Amino acid sequence: MLADLCLPLDDLEPALHRERVAALLAKGYDAVASVHTATGRLSEADRCTLAPVPAASLASATPDAKRALLLRSGPAATAAVAPGVGSGAGGGGGGADGGLPPCHLRQLSRLHFVAADPVQAAQLAAAADVVRSYDIVSIAPKSERVLFQACSSLDVDVIALELASRSALKLRAPAVKAALKRGIHFEICYAPGLREPTARRNLFCAAQALVRATRGRNILLSSSARSAFEVRSPLEVAAMATLFGLTRQQAQDALCLAPRAVLAHAAARLAGRGAAPVAVAAPAPGGAGDAGAAATPGLGEDAGTPGPEPGDGDVEMGDTEAKPQPPAQGRPQRPQRQAAAAAAAASPAAGQAAAGAGGSRKRRGAGS
């Protein structure tokens, strides 16, 4: 599934939004997300009122969008509506869409919350009804405390860092590892880098640092386009992602698999399965449960994740456990030394005599 999950709607004319969605439809995208931005606090005015763009409006925007809409609907639907497509609103029996088939493009809603301190970040939990009216929830942290809170405890789906502007935020290894374990994705928006050289330089430097911190995992590529001119095709976005430090496979995953994972995480959050507590069984009496308790992972631990975790190279040295080394084996002892050691264990005088005898034999052998 190809998706662009960041189309800001604030202070944007409906005609420009329709052109953006039509451009994404013509380039082969399967889902888009319209974004409402809230800063500092949430109220009833922030409840989701976003409406999808009708198929007739998308088809009338550009010929390419109309062609993509017909092709993705299948040959049967195309043949059924073809006679009435050009006959206006009354032809073809299409109703409000003027004979067009249903639009396959999935149009979602997204809440983008900007928080400067943990008190503002707590608004996401306080206004739960407003938050649940959106399909996707993302946060833009303005401080490291909010970033760590978003990675470890906040109920969000996407963390959107302002990569196109210089920021003092540092990606700490514990925060990144906590976000990856919880299934939260980090978003890279490419459209700000198309507007001016300074933003482009900041975007590439910050995106490369983000890819190094996550090792290319849980990266989501979006546009954040203001117009249809800033929309790029999936192949162009994948080629740009390789300049961010992603491999080709990671770039394809960031385009196809990451949106699906974000939607699955959002569905689990809305269903109440995102933060379910796991109960640990009590140890059986008689000491039989001690071994089982030692092998049972604690709450929040991921016992089934093999291999090194991202960010392990940034952890402090005290977090790394030393592996037990096998005891060093010396060279085998000669029979004279073995006899001297046995005599020394029996009596000190006999041990000294045996040691002297062994030394005299060694000197005679060297003289001969």
Image: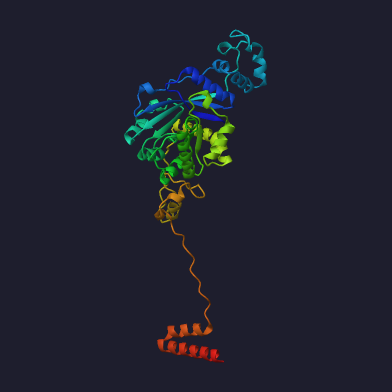
Q: Is residue 11 visible?
A: yes
Q: Nearer the viewer, residue 186 or 287?
A: 186
Q: Where's the C terminus, which quadrant? A: bottom right
The residue lying furthest to the left in this view is 119
Residue furthest out toward the top = 90
Which x, y percent locates residue 99? 61, 13
Q: Position of residue 293 (x, y in %)?
A: 43, 52
Please tell me in which quadrant of the rendered image residue 241 appears.
top right
* Quadrant position of residue 114: top left
Q: Quadrant of the N terminus?
A: top right
- Image: 226 above or below 353: above
Q: Position of residue 235 (x, y in %)?
A: 59, 33
Residue 327, relative to residue 47: is it above or below?
A: below
Instruction: From the viewer's side, name the closer residue of 368 and 292.
Output: 368
User: In this orientation, which residue lies closer to the viewer: 277 or 67?
Assistant: 67
Residue at image position (66%, 12%) is 83
* Residue at image location 42% in from the left, 44% down from the top: 300
Residue 278 at what x, y percent from top left? 43, 42
Tell whether 231 sits left or right of 50.
right
User: Toward the viewer: 176 or 292?
Assistant: 176
- On the image, which quarter does residue 347 sit in? bottom left
Q: Is 150 on the left or on the right of 189, as rendered?
A: left
